[in-house]
Amino acid sequence: MKKSVFIGALTAATLVAGVAGAATLDDVKARGELICGVNTGLVGFAAPDANGNWSGFDVAICQAVAGAVLGDPSKVKYVPTSGQTRFTALGSGEVDLLARNTTWTFSRDTDLKLQFTATNYYDGQGFMVRKDSGVTSAKELDGASVCIQTGTTTELNLADYFKANNMSYQPITVDSNAEGEQQFLAGACDAYTTDASGLAATRAAFANPKDYVILPEIISKEPLAPAVRQGDDQWTDIVRWTIFALIAAEEYGVTSANIDELAKGTENPEVNRLLGTEGDLGAMIGLDKNWAVNAIKANGNYGEIFAATIGEQTPIGLARGLNAQWTQGGLMYAPPFR
Amino acid sequence: MTTAPDAPEHTGFRLSQLIYDTRYRSITIQIVVLFLVMGFVGWLVDNTIQNLNALGKDFNYGFLSQRAGYDIGNALIPYNNDMSHGRALLVGLLNTLWVSFLGCITATVIGVIVGVLRLSKNWLVGRLMTIYVEVFRNIPVLLWILVAIALLTEAAPSPNQYKVNPATGEAQTSMVLESVAFTNRYTAIPSIHFDRSLGSLDTALAPISLNFLAIVVVLLASWFAVKLVNKRAARVQEATGVRPTTLWTNLAIWVLPVAILVTALGINPEEPVLKGFNFVKGTNVSNAFVALWAGLSLYTAAFIAEIVRAGILAVSKGQTEAAFALGLRANRTMSLVILPQALRVIIPPLISQYLNLTKNSSLAIAVGYLDLRGTLGGITLNQTGRELEAITLMMLIYLVISLLISGGMNVFNNRVKLKER
């Protein structure tokens, strides 16, 4: 009797704790801070500077969401996660949002109980080799040692690609991008493989980036998307539509420079709805009227973020390619704000 | 009607006796603690079930039969990415067992030598061994493994430096004895090749070459024959007092049959050849494996050395003096009198060192050697997202390995310990 009462009380306690964790929006508001899972350090996407301030393409998403929810893009706590720990960190509630160049796949979406919000970067897996190795195509990599980060989709793509092309390889497993970089530079592997954007970012951090080439073959589709836990639809909507707001802002020409001007009201009803001068989109999503204004103000629209963190003017030097607006022949397409 | 408060009138059991009566108190405490422990375990299980439900996850091991899809660099049994996660688990488990087994052997050999030498009367040798022990056992083993991999990766040339330049006809680096190449990825050594094969036996685990099996059978037969010869020698010694020389007969029994067999099978070494990016043929022993092996062995050997030293010092000096008085030389005294007695002190702590080494082998992930932690607890866990299942299974496997080692060593301990009659 005594025991069953005891366990009953504990069960009740855990139940209460479990339910309290469900509404992420309330948690974030109560905490006054968004906890964002990011990469342990990938220049251009998420990396801390000498003062410990995080910046990058993924970090900008965190800041935009913090802007939309809390009105202050600086209220973000960054939790560095490795390829191995990221889903556990999200699933256990350690982070509210995982913005860590994570590929949207079927099994992750369904079996891992994640909810991918919206693709913010269309990527593909590539290879990087030393220039003096004379390799110009991934098809010439038969018998090579390939450094590969464990716990990623790239591991499976690599196995499939070599099998499809009837080639053999020696996998050299590494735990993080930093370790892969070190092994590759030391010559312990002939090629380093990860997402092409990651390769460009990694190469930008080398002492002599010109001594290394990224091979033309892209062997997979890697739509990178920020993810949240399954089962909290409101929170999913907030993150998803914050990203869409950034993309739509670029399409409608809303930039960090003119947003204050446009927020007073424009001729374009779609822009007015987005910026909260018309309609009541903020209330529908459970946020302030000017949620999108705050999100865009954080680091500018999608195009501005891209240009500032990984674009052609940065050391990483990625072209827009698939990530251009749909009006420019790319895949970035935000559903209508109405 | 009065009652004296200091004279209880009824002698039956009262509830307060559970706390104030020393006869019952210990039982009361034990029952309360038992309930607390059961409650805590119940809470853990319940909490897990609640949280799994909240996440919409179930608990099942079905993923072990799904296609793994990833490759493993150093597999001891045939493996490719079409095989199941269960097979990958097995590959990892064998890698764990292999590095632990070799590690235990080298750690013991180095440990015994260092432990004995540390007691040496030679000042320099004694001090050097002290330095070895103190340096290795006081720095975390992970750092030793990382130092080893860094040395191997940074110091050795890359495979393409062995490439012969067609213009000059020379390579930047040449192979040791024309057959061994140290590179920053692996050490390429010749593998054993038989011209004539007896075929192979297909088992579920791996195909076993019948040549190899034949050699093992012959060696077992030799071992048995040597035992017979020794028994006979002991009989002669007991009857006549003179032990016949068995060294040459035994050596012949060990060497000749195997030599004849392998010659008949046409044994020859297959030397590694550089082709494309890497050495092919031969056997490539990966640096990750060597670094892990060296790190674990050197670290654990320092502890074993101290155990051996303590064991030897535990045997009283009178034993040595008695042996000398009987005319035994120093090395015979050590092997016949001191070490057998010291073993009784040495073996129990040695068991825990073996267990430590085996468990420390899970640091393999630091150098990218895919052991059980790397396959089941690393890639499989990540690709399937079955954290709870994978970690629970991994804990269970390590527990079973440790219990087996400690069980085996206890049997050995029972055989050498002092028999009281």
Image (cartoon, coloured by chain):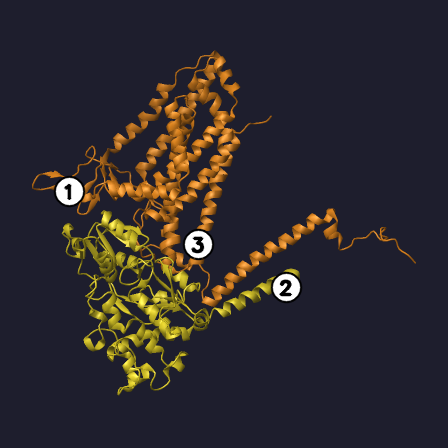
Chain colours: A yellow, B orange
Q: Are marks 3 and 1 on the same chain?
A: yes
The number of numbered discs placed on residues in the rendered structure image is 3
Q: Chain of mark 2?
A: A
Question: Can you tell which quarter of the image residue A57 is in?
Answer: bottom left
**Measured along the vertical axis of the image, is residue B273 above or below residue A318?**
above
Q: Up-down: is B319 above or below B133?
A: above
Marks 1 and 2, how far apart in space? 75 Å
Q: Which one is in front, B361 or B213?
A: B361
Mark 1 nearby-residue class (10 Å; few <14, some 14–19, many ≥20) = many
Name the chain letter of the residue that bears numbered label 1.
B
According to the image, label 1 marks what residue?
B163
Could you tell me which secondary element the residue under label 2 belongs to? helix
Percent x, y for residue B210? 32, 38
In x, y percent, where is residue A278? 34, 86
Residue density around tag 3, few if under 14, some if 14–19, many if 20 or more, within 10 Å: some
Q: Quadrant of the N terminus of chain A?
A: bottom right
Q: Which mark is residue A180?
A: none
- Residue drawn at 25 percent across, 44 percent down: B185
Tell me, yes or no, if residue B311 can be seen here.
Answer: yes
Q: Is residue B328 above or below residue B125?
A: above
User: Quick one: SS at disc 1?
Assistant: loop
Q: Secondary structure at mark 3?
A: helix
Q: Which amino acid type is marked by label 1?
A: Lys
Amino acid at dot 3: Ile
Q: Nearer the viewer, residue A298 or B47?
A: A298
The residue wearing badge 2 is: A5
Kindly identify which residue carries mark 3.
B391
Q: Looking at the image, is mark 3 or mark 1 earlier in the sequence?
A: 1
- Dot 2 surroundings within 10 Å: few (below 14), some, or many (20 or more)? few
Q: Amino acid at mark 2?
A: Val
